[in-house]
Amino acid sequence: MTRRTALLAGATGLVGGHCLELLLQDDTWQQVVVLGRREIGTTHRKLVQRVVDFDRLAELGDIPRVDDVFGCLGTTMKHAGSEEAFRRVDFTYVYELARLASRHGAGQFLLVSALGADPQSRFFYNRVKGEVEEAVRKLPFDGVHIFRPSLLLGERRESRPGERLAILAGRALGFMFVGPLGRYRPIAARAVAAAMIRVAKDAARGVHVYESDRLRALAG
């Protein structure tokens, strides 16, 4: 198979950081293009960094042709500061990234969403996640792959006390998350990234959704 080019947005995030590491290690990809507000402290012969203004992403016209797009952008309500700011990152930036990639001939889009994403949800967070899933599905990619992890395990740059308590509770009650409840068990961010890499390499056509129990199986 011809070696491919990946485009990654959100490389400083929990899942995105692991995706970058795995992409750079994998010979499937000959080049990894990272879009970010600033350069990251990583150098590699395959890595190309592009500093962009995500508010003007739709105007960006000189990115290289890529095969696989990893959309790992996301924030929290606390960090965003308002519903409007949250929507700008988790919907507008993600959708404009997908539209940009589609215009430049990308074959597949791999989107990190969240468990419970639903455009009809009463909860704002889940509703925005569902809305962006729905919007990306409509773009003319050969494949759209949506990853819905539960609570993510891993070292974050910022402190999230409420999330940490939920994770500790999830670990203590892990024996309860079996069968249909397996998708609610906390999952390592690296496992999500590993599942994304495997799915990207398979390059299945159509729209596919993967929740935490399936992600763990794909990650091996």
Image (tube, helix red, strand yellow):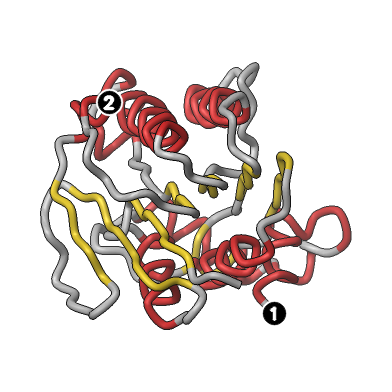
Residue 90, quarter of picture? top left
Q: Is residue 76 left or right of residue 102?
A: left
Quarter of the picture holding the N terminus: bottom right
8 or 112: nearer the viewer: 8
Which residue position is annotated with label 1? Answer: 220
Callout 1–callout 2 Cβ contact below 8 Å: no
At which x and y percent is residue 113?
Answer: 54, 43
Q: Is residue 209 left or right of residue 147?
A: right
Q: Which mark is residue 58?
A: 2
Q: Residues within 10 Å of mark 1 (few under 14, many from 20)?
A: few
Q: Residues within 10 Å of mark 2 (few under 14, many from 20)?
A: some
211 or 52: nearer the viewer: 52
Q: Earlier in the sequence, mark 1 or mark 2?
A: 2
3 or 74: nearer the viewer: 3
Query: What residue is shown at x 49% (from left), y 66% (from top)?
Result: 189
At which x and y percent is residue 162?
Answer: 41, 51
Which kind of residue does numbered mark 1 sit on? Gly
